[in-house]
Amino acid sequence: MSEQGTPVGTARSRTTAEWVTLAASALVVFSVLGLLIVDLIVGSSRDPVIRVDACFDAIYEEGEKYYLPTTIINEGGRTAADVSVHFVLHPGGEAPAESSTFTLRFLAPGEQAEAVIIFNAEPRPETLRFSSSYLYP
Amino acid sequence: MRKAPDLSPWKTQYNDLVRSFTGVFLFGIPFIYTMEMWWISTYIDIWKLLIFLAIALAINIHLGHLIHLPLSSNWSTAVGEALYNIGVGMVGALVILFLLGRIVFGDPLNESLGKILLETIPLSIGAAVTRKIERESEVRRNRPAVQEGTRHWNVVLNQIGITLAGSLFLSLPLASTDEIQMLAAGTTDYQVIALVPFSLLVGYIIVYRDSLAPTWAGDARPGRLPVLVDILMTYGVSFFAALATLYLFDRIELGNPLVHVVSQTVVLGLPATVGGAAGRRLI
């Protein structure tokens, strides 16, 4: 809001432009406040629930390596920190077991992260196992 | 001496809004480019965010009261100022965080609100302080833009120098951090492209924001071409400053993929442009 030509010590009424700007600002602020309150009331405080979806249908091969797209989702109500996902592949036969681990710094409730795991042998649902862990922030 | 032109209330309000966003960019960019601010937003409790909002409101009510002293001691005016500054801070945070890929569609709501609210305090204070400073320096803008007889190229070189100084002021501390690489890696090509016109727009707003003649080569009212050239120059110098600081801090090297170099430079180019344009405006 601006002051122009107003004598010292006196308050002047707002112009229409100032009222419009004030209304827009108040709408923004109270909308954010309202969303916060709604989230506070209906939000879940459930501990993080980490789900790992390996997309075997989307495996692709490049240079004799197998690339497995994976999605990690936090289905809980709280943020998980240092989410660690560990994959172990047992291809069978004489092929050695392979393992791969990655860590996500933070995973908020409802947030999902995309990752790609790279193996020498083709991963299949019956040969791939994974485990995960996290810390409370 | 030039006399400030009489402006309509809408034009005055526009100028005030632009001043506010100038403060948002000037004061808020270093905070927005801090990864810890993004991370904290993912796990901070909602009640703490409400406290942050209350603190922002209290500080801005106090600043609003100071801005209007001695013209008015009406506290309702101060509350209105506070809502205005906080609203500007929130919108500014949302726009910049969206362009930098820190807020995307589909993000959890509380995470997005957290990112916006954590930035609101410094950004709203920036808006309030800038408007306070600018109101107290109205006389400064009535001075002649360029002294009589000043050679054209001397003015241009001075402007380039000021722009470079301002660009380096903001880009140097940011270029050494990991945030620029993280942001460049996390933004899509469209977001990187959108950052260029956004940086040009920000530069234009900061340098030309209140319809008074800028200090360009002695022109009292430059035409469209000089304005365009001026803004492109501001961005070009800022882009160069960003590129140079990234190279000097070993964030980019000769032989790096061009896309990698360009995306980092464009990302750092936004705060560099803010600094360069602010230098032009304040000095």
Image: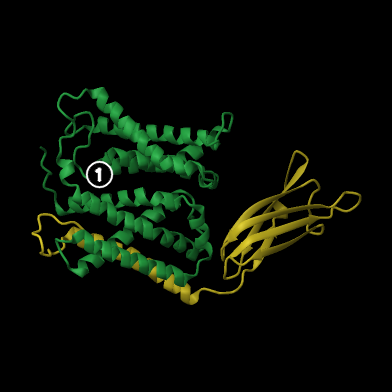
Image point (29%, 43%), residue name? B206
Quarter where residue B194 is shown:
top left
Image point (46%, 59%), residue name? B115
Query: Does A82 sit left or right of B138 as displayed?
Result: right
Query: Does B149 sit left or right of B95 as displayed?
Result: left
Image quadrant where one finds the N terminus of chain B: top left
Q: Is residue B121 above or below residue B218?
A: below
Q: Amino acid at mark 1?
A: Arg
Figure chain in yellow: A
**Label 1: which residue?**
B209
Tell me, yes or no, if residue B214 can be seen here: yes
Query: Does A110 sit left or right of B57 as displayed?
Result: right
> Foreground residue, B247 or B213?
B247
Residue at the far bottom: name it.
A41
Image quadrant where one finds the C terminus of chain B: top left
Chain of the residue where label 1 is placed in the rendered structure: B
Q: Position of residue A7 (x, y in %)?
A: 8, 59
Quarter where residue B207 is shown:
top left
Query: Does B220 sit left or right of B283 as displayed?
Result: left
Figure chain in green: B
Quarter where residue B148 is shown:
top left
